[in-house]
């Protein structure tokens, strides 16, 4: 009986395992291609098999990458880190305050704001770029870093995520006990609620960081100065230039190498912050 049951269980799980393996392969193949292609010179990139190594040229590609056009790639990398870092920190702070307020306070129009928040989640971010451009143009901050950072500070999904997390994981009794002990609302939020919201805040931070880091359409519309470009717009500019020159200018290998290096900070961020997802929801209560 036991042997037959185990056999039936294995028979039922092979299909999910197969689908999971196919999904993993689907996501790994493009990454593998980028890693392999970044080690090739442009002639090898165009002539050699896509998923096989040729002469190892990664070091030369990196050196050329940071020297091309006066080292503009380094500036694009700094710009991207600045835009993504400020946006992620600001969006996390706003989402924490908004989500906690919606979850633990009663005020006039609360239901309306919650419904509006859900509605804003459904609106694609690209649909808001042109109206945002018109507003920021009136304010005179188009073609500045704030034209990219300010729109990225608003995260309806992040606010809703924090609201749900607080509603489920931050006991009302704990907040009431702090109020009985005459703790102010700011102190309750800072010393009790924020540590308990850490997993949700890390999630909002990472989602906003990745979204801003990979954002292309917003900076494309807002920025006209190449020195302010993030990596997405800058590398696309190089790629278009290489296509127009029919591959005569050695840029295809630099675009691939630059794309590979652009992934590294995101991987590092996930590795460093993933431990906070495993933290207990009641960590703040212990403190």
Image: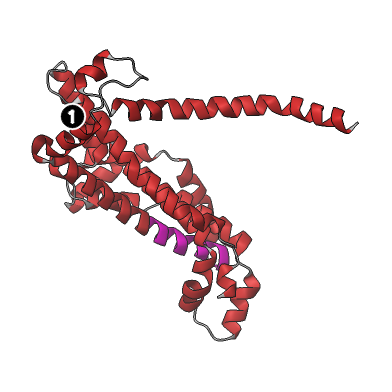
On screen, residue 88 versus residue 166, left or right, reads left
Location of residue 111 (image quadrant)? bottom right
Name the residue carrying label 1: 238
Place of residue 275 in the rendered image (x, y in percent of width and height, measured from the top left): 50, 56
Q: Please state the horizontal and vertical placement of residue 59, each as a whole percent of the image.
A: 22, 35
Which residue is more in the foreground, 42 or 131?
42
The answer to whether residue 268 is above or below residue 9 is: below
Residue at 59 percent of width and 63 percent of height: 281
The number of discs equals 1
Seen from the viewer's position, the closer of residues 77 and 140 is: 77
Q: Is residue 196 magenta?
A: no
**Badge 1: few (under 14), some or many (20 or more) residues near its Cα, within 10 Å?**
some
Q: Position of residue 99 (x, y in %)?
A: 50, 60
Q: Residue at the location (59% across, 62% down)?
A: 280
Q: Quadrant of residue 55?
A: top left
Magenta highlight: main SS: helix
**In this orientation, which residue lies closer to the viewer: 237 or 118?**
237
Kindly give the residue lying farthest to the right in the view shown: 1
Farthest residue, direction bottom? 182
From this viewpoint, is residue 167 visible?
A: yes
- Label 1: which secondary element: helix
Q: Is residue 224 visible?
A: no
- Left or right: residue 224 versus residue 98 is left
Residue located at (16% from left, 37% from top): 63
Question: Magenta region: which residues?
Answer: 91-106
State the quadrant of the N terminus: top right
Q: Tell me, yes or no, whether the highlighted magenta stretch contains residue 105.
A: yes
Residue 31: x, y in percent?
A: 39, 30
Question: Which residue lies most toward the front here?
Answer: 55
Of 69 and 87, nearer the camera is 69
């Amino acid at each position: 009986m036991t042997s037959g049951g185990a056999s039936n269980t294995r028979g039922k799980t092979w299909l999910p395992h197969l689908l999971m393996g196919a999904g993993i392969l689907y996501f790994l193949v493009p990454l593998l291609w980028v890693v392999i292609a970044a080690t090739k010179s442009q002639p090898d990139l165009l002539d050699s098999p896509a998923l096989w190594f040729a002469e190892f040229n990664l070091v030369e590609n990196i050196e050329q990458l940071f020297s091309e056009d006066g080292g503009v790639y380094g500036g694009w990398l700094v710009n991207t880190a600045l835009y993504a870092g400020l946006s992620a920190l600001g969006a996390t702070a706003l989402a924490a305050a908004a989500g906690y307020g919606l979850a633990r306070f009663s005020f006039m129009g609360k239901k309306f704001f919650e419904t509006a928040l859900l509605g804003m989640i459904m609106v694609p971010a690209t649909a808001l770029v042109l109206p945002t451009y018109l507003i920021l143009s009136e304010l005179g901050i188009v073609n500045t870093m704030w034209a990219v950072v300010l729109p990225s500070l608003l995260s309806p999904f992040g606010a809703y995520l924090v609201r749900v997390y607080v509603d489920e994981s931050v006991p009302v009794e704990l907040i009431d006990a702090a109020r009985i002990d005459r703790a102010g609302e700011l102190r309750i939020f800072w010393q009790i609620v924020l540590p308990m919201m850490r997993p949700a805040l890390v999630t909002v931070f990472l989602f906003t960081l990745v979204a801003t880091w990979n954002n292309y359409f917003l900076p494309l519309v807002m920025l006209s100065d190449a020195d302010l470009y993030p990596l997405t717009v800058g590398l696309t500019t190089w790629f278009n230039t290489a296509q127009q020159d029919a591959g005569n200018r050695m840029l295809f290998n630099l675009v691939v190498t630059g794309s590979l290096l652009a992934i590294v900070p995101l991987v590092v961020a996930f590795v460093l912050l993933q431990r906070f997802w495993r933290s207990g929801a009641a960590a703040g209560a212990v403190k």
